[in-house]
Image (cartoon, coloured by chain):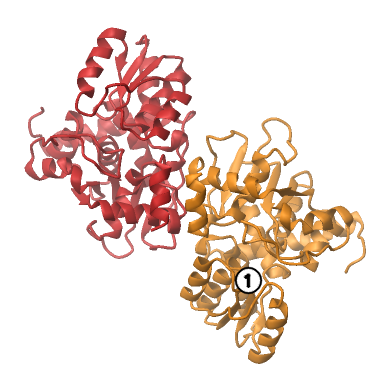
Chain colours: A orange, B red
Amino acid sequence: MATPTTKADTQTFLQHHRQEIERAAQTIAPYTRRTPTLTTDLDPDLLLKPECFQVTGSFKTRGAFNAILTLKNQQTNPKGVIAVSSGNHAQALALAAKTAGIPALVLIPEDANPQKVAATKAYGAEVRQAGITFANREERLAEAIEETGYMLVHPFDNWDIIHGAGTAALELLTDNGLRPKTIVTPCGGGGLLTGTALAAKSTNARIRVYGVEPEVADDAARTYASGSLQTLPTSPETLADGVRTTHIGEKNFEVIVERRLVDGIVTVSEEEIRQATKTAWTRLKLALEPTGALPLAAYLAGKIPAGDPDEPTALILSGGNANLAVIADLLQQ
Amino acid sequence: MATPTTKADTQTFLQHHRQEIERAAQTIAPYTRRTPTLTTDLDPDLLLKPECFQVTGSFKTRGAFNAILTLKNQQTNPKGVIAVSSGNHAQALALAAKTAGIPALVLIPEDANPQKVAATKAYGAEVRQAGITFANREERLAEAIEETGYMLVHPFDNWDIIHGAGTAALELLTDNGLRPKTIVTPCGGGGLLTGTALAAKSTNARIRVYGVEPEVADDAARTYASGSLQTLPTSPETLADGVRTTHIGEKNFEVIVERRLVDGIVTVSEEEIRQATKTAWTRLKLALEPTGALPLAAYLAGKIPAGDPDEPTALILSGGNANLAVIADLLQQ
């Protein structure tokens, strides 16, 4: 990994990535949606970026289209693309590959949300689930790459994916008149958090950026606190099925930890995730998946450091592809 | 009721009401939200105006603030305001009255959605439910007006309410680049449909406007078809608890039926309402109440006459204050 960097280095680094995020925004514009920024009855200082309204129902479409179209533009012409994903990256990659006319193969662990698996197949990707677990998935991925010759599109440890993800924060920061001083995203592998940090800090170094993960999946919080990469022994059991990765990526580590472009990683309990998801559905009228409600969970629990009064906090609500049985259960409690 | 009118009359009529809708938009702007226009993965020709994101969770806030603030501006200074409502008008009136510093009394039938009743009380209104039914509510209202001296704010047969409701369509028609050729709204008493028709036909006489009501509450469809006011014998039992009125209002009759400023009234079955509500929650990621999903039900059932290809159809999804037990049940089917 890169050695610690000076402030001047970071300015150059931020300028480069800012340009790449702006380029990503242009690249993906014909295929993705500019999601609105919503205000709510809950709290006048809260802004919401509901990525549940993004194409395929999650922010992942931004990165997937940027990665696939950048491959095409570079005339790399891969035989096909491949990824391992618990669901939202799979759907996004499937649609982007289909749009670009490239075959896609996605490995999804056997216990993934069945609605996400069905959607991935519906977007035209080949899906393999048999015998794939969180524990063996990297090994199975390596075998499949060797077998097919397809090009890996990593769900978070990939600059094109990160730059695509950063376009959500870019929109949030350029929507007329809205000037969030704090931006909060979920954190699994760190793709959305990394892209958001690059977009925010290249706009204004004083904008605070926080990532939120479940308490039972606190590898990023421990990595941030210790300064060295921490890995969960097994994939965590959490309601937030989109952040079941065991550690953040190398590129994400560089931005979040080494360069300190993120101000903190906050953890939330399963009960806090549950309540936030219910609040989203019943009070905000947003049908979020629990992963998408992670920033709301941290905000409602008072875990995001307050800015000055009247300084808005923006929550990037990453997706809405919920397991309906889980939601039905929540609504009845 | 007014006698049939000439085309020239209707132009003057439309110009007057257009000005009033534009004035309403200015009056309510500080207290209401400009809801976004959403596109979806479902159909590229569909535009959604999700009024579930409006203050209090429904479009009713637009009319309530316009009515109450117009009363204040006219220095009428009522002792208090009073209404009978199954829920969303009640919440909106309660908030608008509280904002204006006027007491509000709302009569809500005993079998109304309990979440709507709780919210109305939370916004500071006095609520009476004991012994109030759909059958006796007008009588009880007359008694309460006599007892309190409060001023009636009718939920739909009131021009200020209609002009406020029309601001949703005004936004839809002025959002950059989006040019719906058809606009669809729910129809209960006809307030939203009337305001929408006035906003649309004063923009362009060729914009088609449709109202949607449950089959079991088909008074507006029969009124439109027959040209004379039809009334349901009793308040209908429907999942769409926001449109349980037994007939449309006089002012609504003038616009919808006499002046023919609406192109049709469509009815949908309870099963179509059920499926549309589920589609909203699971595919559109919008937590709508069944009444808010009526236009979607008609659209999905192919009951809205298609325009030319690529001519967008906009659905005004009126609210999101759902009965959670009903929704939980839907999600498990």
Count every numbered label the image shows and give the total.
1
Q: Quadrant of the N terminus of chain A?
A: bottom right
Viewer-proximal residue, B305 or B12? B305
> Splitting the image into 4 quarters, where does residue A154 fall?
bottom right
Left or right: A111 as drawn, with respect to A325: right
Viewer-proximal residue, B280 or A325? A325
Can you say whether B197 is above or below B147 in the image? below
Q: Estimate how packed mark 1 is, as few (under 14), some (14 to 19) or many (20 or more) residues with alpha carbons within 10 Å.
A: many
For image coordinates 58% across by 73% down, the residue present is A93
Where does residue B329 sit, x and y in percent of width and height?
39, 51
Left or right: A98 as drawn, with respect to A75: left
Where does residue B15 sit, x and y in percent of width and height?
26, 34
For image coordinates 29% across by 40% down, the residue present is B196
Q: What element carries label 1?
A: loop
For image coordinates 73% across by 36% down, the residue present is A306
Can you say whether A277 is above or below A22 in the image? above
Residue denoted by label 1: A85
Left or right: A163 as drawn, with respect to B47: right
Residue type indicated by callout 1 = Ser
Where does residue A179 sit, x and y in percent of width and height?
65, 41
Asked if residue B39 shows in the view, the reply is no
Can you say whether A34 is above or below B224 in the image? below
For image coordinates 28% across by 8% down, the residue present is B147
To which chain does the residue with label 1 belong?
Answer: A
Viewer-proximal residue, A197 or A235? A235
Where does residue A238 sit, x and y in percent of width and height?
65, 58
Asked if residue B303 shows in the view, the reply is yes
Can you say whether B90 is above or below B149 in the image? below
